[in-house]
Image (cartoon, grey):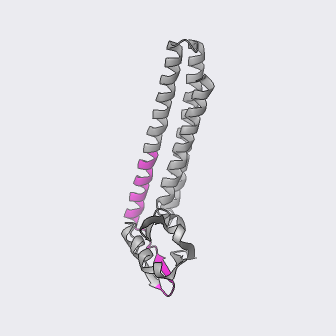
C-alpha cells in the first residue's frame, strides 16, 4: 500500500461518513411534509421486509400531507400499520385506495429536540471522521516502521490527512447548520 492509497482510502471513508450523515439528517422531520421521512419504513410484503417505496408510490398531496398509493390494493392496511408502527409520530389513515399521512406541525419544544438530534448525528459523524484520520496515521507510521516510506513522506501525508479531516469536519458543521435552520424555520 502506498501513501497515495492511504490518503485515497481515508478520503473515500470520510466521504461515506458525510453521505451517512446526509441520509440521517434527511430522516429528521422539519415543519413541512416530505416523502423522505418514510424512506426507512419497512413493509411486510409476502413475508419479506420491503422498503415502502418498493410497494407503493409516495407523493405530496399538500404541504402537510403525504399520499401513499400502494401498487396492490390489498397492501393498504399493511402499509398503514407499517407507518403507524415505524415510531415516527405519524397517524396514517386510509381513504379509498390511498393512505393519507398528515404530518402534525412541530411544537417549539419538538423543534429543539430535533436540533439536538441533528447535533448528536453530527458529533457521531465527526467521531467517525477522526477515527478514519487515526487509522490512516497509524498506517503511515507502520509504513515508516517497515521502511516503505520516509519520515518526511509520512509527515507530509499526515498533514494532508489532517487537512482532509478539517475539510470534512467543516462540511459536517455546514450540513448541520443548514438542517438546524430548516428545522427552526416555522
Specify the quadrant of the image occupied by residue 58: bottom right
Specify the quadrant of the image occupied by residue 43: bottom left
- Above/below status of 110 relative to 137: below
Q: Residue at x 52, y 54 (%)?
A: 23
Q: Position of residue 10 (x, y in %)?
A: 55, 33
Q: Residue at x 47, y 23 (%)?
A: 138
Foreground pick, 74 / 15: 74
53 in magenta: no
Q: Is residue 74 left or right of residue 15?
A: left
Which stretch is magenta?
95-123
Residue that sits furthest to the bottom in the current view: 96
Q: Residue at x 53, y 68 (%)?
A: 53
- Asked whether residue 46 is in view, the answer is yes
Q: Which quadrant holds the N terminus?
A: top right
User: How many numbered marks have been drawn onto this rendered protein structure?
Assistant: 0
- Asked whether residue 34 is in view, the answer is no
- Above/below status of 180 relative to 94: above
Q: Position of residue 111 (x, y in %)?
A: 42, 62
Q: Position of residue 59 (x, y in %)?
A: 57, 74
106 in magenta: yes
Q: Position of residue 181 (x, y in %)?
A: 52, 57
Q: Residue at x 43, y 55 (%)?
A: 115
Residue that sits furthest to the front in the current view: 46
Specify the quadrant of the image occupied by residue 149: top right
Foreground pick, 10 / 177: 10
Foreground pick, 94 / 63: 94
- Above/below status of 186 relative to 148: below
Q: Is residue 156 left or right of residue 90?
A: right
Amino acid at each position: 500500500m502506498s501513501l497515495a492509497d492511504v490518503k485515497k482510502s481515508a478520503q473515500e471513508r470520510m466521504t461515506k461518513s458525510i453521505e451517512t450523515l446526509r441520509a440521517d439528517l434527511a430522516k429528521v422531520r422539519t415543519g413541512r411534509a416530505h416523502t423522505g421521512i418514510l424512506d426507512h419504513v419497512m413493509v411486510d410484503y409476502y413475508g419479506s421486509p420491503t422498503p415502502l417505496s418498493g410497494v407503493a408510490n409516495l407523493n405530496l398531496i399538500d404541504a402537510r400531507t403525504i399520499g401513499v398509493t400502494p401498487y396492490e390494493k390489498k397492501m393498504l392496511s399493511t402499509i398503514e400499520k407499517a407507518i403507524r408502527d415505524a415510531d415516527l409520530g405519524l397517524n396514517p389513515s386510509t381513504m379509498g385506495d390511498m393512505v393519507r399521512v398528515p404530518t402534525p406541525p412541530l411544537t417549539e419544544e419538538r423543534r429543539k429536540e430535533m436540533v439536538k438530534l441533528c447535533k448528536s448525528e453530527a458529533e457521531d459523524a465527526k467521531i467517525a471522521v477522526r477515527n478514519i484520520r487515526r487509522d490512516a496515521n497509524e498506517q503511515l507510521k507502520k509504513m515508516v516502521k517497515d521502511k516503505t516510506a520516509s519520515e518526511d513522506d509520512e509527515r507530509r501525508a499526515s498533514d494532508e490527512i489532517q487537512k482532509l479531516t478539517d475539510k470534512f469536519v467543516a462540511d459536517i458543521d455546514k450540513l448541520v447548520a443548514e438542517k438546524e435552520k430548516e428545522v427552526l424555520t416555522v
